[in-house]
Amino acid sequence: MMLSRRSVINMINNSKNVQQFERGTDCAGTDPAPDRSKEVGIPDALKNFDSLPDSASVRLPVVKALKACSAATVWRMVKRGDLPAPRKISERITAWNVGELRKALAA
């Protein structure tokens, strides 16, 4: 029995689909539910916030996690005086003093 070129291509594609199904991937070869735990990690500074000295500095992702809010809300809180103003460490780096943050969080 001679198979047409189209039949062979269909068989190959169906074979790939079965293999992908068995591996738990979709037809594009990607995982249907990708593990995003590495993408949305907890910053080390937040994990160790209690052990940081008061003189340490933390950046915006840590402050966002401490207050459980967005970056825009953090800046609004700074403007209102609910959070201490950050310090410019360099032209593109802004950080908050841990001691000042602790006092603001305790209030």
Image (cartoon, rainbow, N blue to C red):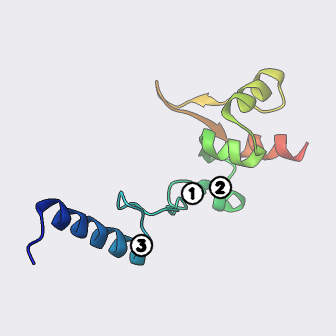
Query: Residue 100 appears at what percent x and percent y?
Result: 75, 40
Q: Amino acid at mark 1?
A: Gly
Instruction: Give the secondary structure at mark 3.
Output: helix
Q: Would residue 21 appear left or right of 96 to someone viewing this image?
A: left
Q: Amino acid at mark 3?
A: Phe
Kindly give the residue lying farthest to the front in the view shown. Answer: 1
* Residue beneath the point at 68% across and 57% down: 49
Across and down, in percent, residue 5 comes to 11, 61
Residue identifier under label 2: 46
SS at badge 2: helix
Q: Earlier in the sequence, mark 1 or mark 2?
A: 1
The residue singled out by tag 3 in the image is 21
Give the percent coordinates (x, y) of residue 64.
69, 42
Q: Is residue 35 above or below residue 103?
A: below
Image quarter in which the C terminus is found: top right
Q: Are marks 3 and 2 in contact (CB under 8 Å)?
A: no
| Residue located at (56% from left, 54% from top) | 40
Q: Which residue appears at 65% of the width and 37% of the height?
A: 96
**Closer to the N terminus: mark 3 or mark 1?**
3
The residue pinned by badge 1 equals 41
Residue 58 sits above or below residue 50 on the image: above
Question: Residue 78: in sight, yes or no?
Answer: yes
